[in-house]
Image (tube, rainbow, N blue to C red):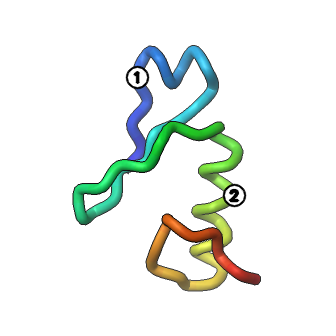
Amino acid sequence: MLAIGAKEAAGDEVALRLRDGRALDAMPAAEALARISGLVAARAAGLREPAVP
């Protein structure tokens, strides 16, 4: 889940919340999209570590 509050919106950032309840630190929206896209392409399950191509 992406959380975009006033603080994140002002900094063009998003905060990711994982299904297991953990929350990642806010990061630039472009970085979050790149991570998610890489994981989808690699069919990986975790967002904590960047996908390895």
Vertical placement of residue 9 versus 46, above or below: above
Q: Quadrant of the C terminus?
A: bottom right
- Residue at left offset 63%, top offset 61%: 35
Of labels 1 and 2, earlier in sequence is 1
Q: Secondary structure at mark 1?
A: loop
Crowding around mark 2 (Cα neighbors within 10 Å: few <14, some 14 to 19, many 20+) is: few
Residue in the foreground of this view, choosing between 24 and 41 = 24
- Residue that carries the numbered disc 2 in the rendered image: 34
Residue in the foreground of this view, choosing between 22 and 8 = 22
- Residue at left offset 63%, top offset 26%: 12
- Residue that carries the numbered disc 1 in the rendered image: 5
Q: Secondary structure at mark 2?
A: helix
Marks 1 and 2 sit apart, C-alpha to C-alpha, by 20 Å
Residue in the foreground of this view, choosing between 43 and 22 = 22
Amino acid identity at mark 1: Gly
Q: Is residue 13 left or right of residue 38?
A: left
Q: Position of residue 17 (x, y in %)?
A: 35, 50
Q: Is residue 46 left or right of residue 10?
A: left
Q: Residue furthest left?
A: 21
**Pointers 1 and 2 in contact (CB under 8 A)?**
no
Locate residue 40: give its quadrant. bottom right
Q: Position of residue 46 (x, y in %)?
A: 46, 74
Amino acid identity at mark 2: Ala
Vertical placement of residue 29 versus 49, above or below: above
Vertical placement of residue 14 versus 16, above or below: above
Locate residue 4: give its quadrant. top left
- Residue at left offset 65%, top offset 37%: 28
Crowding around mark 1 (Cα neighbors within 10 Å: few <14, some 14 to 19, many 20+) is: few
